[in-house]
Amino acid sequence: MSDIRADFTGQTGTGDAGFGDYVQLLKPRVMSLVVFTAMVGLLVAPVGLHPIETLAAIIFIALGGGASGALNMWWDADIDAVMRRTAKRPVPSGAVQAGEALALGLGLSGISVVMLGLATNLLAAGLLAFTIFFYAVIYTMWLKRATPQNIVIGGAAGAFPPMIGWAAATGSISLESVLMFALIFMWTPPHFWALALFMNDDYDKAKVPMLTVTHGRRATRAHILVYTVALVPVALGTAFTAIGGPIYLAVSLVLNALFLLGAWRIWRRDEDTARADHYAVEKSVFKLSLAWLFLHFTAILIEATPWAHALARLIGWEG
Amino acid sequence: MALHREHDLHRRRWGRNLGLGLTLGAFIALVFGLTIAKVQNGSQMQGYDHSYQPELDSATQTPRATP
């Protein structure tokens, strides 16, 4: 019966979403960042896990991240529908019902936390549970619609995965894992504000109090520069800890110089200039920020290899 | 004429069922792999394991002296 009705209406109809729609609920692009940073946290930790345990830990951390994405899409369906960037997400597009997103989010949250606890340890599971709570409740339900500092504080949710990975391997929290957390936490504001500069209409329409909406673009440009300046010592300082080294330092110096230059160029521009070239600088800084994070964590991973240790000894880094 | 016309709806359902099946299969394989890894490590696990272990038998433990 429902098949015949579907023939007449030509609509997807609720409850008939494809598997890909459910995958989209988990925000696979965000998950890729979670997987990568959690993997780095796990692999650079001084305690090694069995390969299967490592694989399981990464999968369950990613699943937890995906669960919080589904909860975010359930709660934010109203503003996602208004924003051009998010209007095609499964809930606002009608492919998946909001209740299904909620059920999937809650179900996967439980599975991921319990399984991570069984696969590794309770600290890692607790941190994952807190991350899901922080993203779904503190950021999505509270901060996002309440304050222009939403992504500054909310950025913590995206910063936890390497700390969870480290905790999964070692069963503890240490300076190194806090530094990896700090790298992502400090990186998030300039990254998102660069995006907000060329997506401002979206946030305005959805009444989301992004800095661009509440304080204007001039203030946002200044904030990007200030937060980038604050990010640099955290990034460079990591080079002189157990997870850093000469390769990391070289990579970080180049990337931070480029990021600072980009932030300075954003700060110097006015809206007329930016509109004239369709926010070319803002878009390039946004892309650079993605590379910045990826390459910093890649450098941390490289520093954990025997070749990097050999190089460090060769040039007297550890001496 | 075929009694059952193939519709986009059926393709979506087939894809969904296949995806769910593969996901569950992968989950079972992962749990199985985890079990093997944990047993191989043998960490924090102790049981009778078909062989008698006196240290686990409460009847063989000397009761603590009460003050």
Image: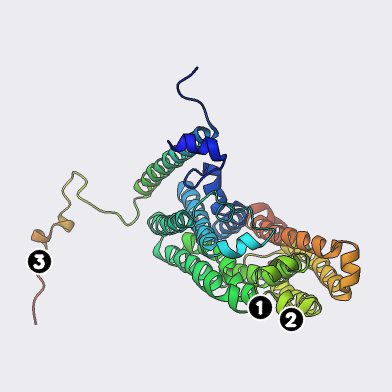
Three-letter amino acid code of the residue under disc 1: Pro
What scheme was used to colour the molecule?
rainbow
Q: Which chain does tag 1 point to?
A: A
* Residue that numbered label 1 is attached to: A148
The residue mark sitting in front, 2 or 3, is 2
Task: Give the number of callouts.
Answer: 3
Residue extending farthest top: B1
- In this view, B31 is above or below A261: above
Give percent across and percent down for residue A40. 59, 57
| Quarter residue A20 falls in | top right
| Quarter residue A210 falls in | bottom right
* Residue that numbered label 2 is attached to: A215
Give the side of residue A264 with respect to residue A107, left or right.
Answer: right
Count residues near mark 3 (Cα–Cα under 10 Å), then give few for <14, some for 14-19, many for 20+. Answer: few
Count residues near mark 2 (Cα–Cα under 10 Å), then give few for <14, some for 14-19, many for 20+. Answer: few
Count residues near mark 1 (Cα–Cα under 10 Å), then give few for <14, some for 14-19, many for 20+. Answer: some
Three-letter amino acid code of the residue under disc 3: Thr
- In this view, A95 is above or below A147: above
Seen from the viewer's position, the closer of residues B7 and A302 is B7
Report helix, strand or loop for mark 1.
loop
Q: Which chain does tag 3 point to?
A: B
Q: Residue at x 62, y 79 (%)?
A: A147
Report helix, strand or loop for mark 2.
loop
Q: Which chain does tag 2 point to?
A: A
* Residue that numbered label 3 is attached to: B62
Residues at circles 1 and 2 in contact by the CB criterion of under 8 Å: yes
Marks 1 and 2, how far apart at CA: 8 Å
Seen from the viewer's position, the closer of residues A51 and A279 is A279
The residue mark sitting in front, 1 or 3, is 1
Give the side of residue A265 with respect to residue A3, left or right.
Answer: right
Is residue A25 visible in the rendered image? The answer is: yes
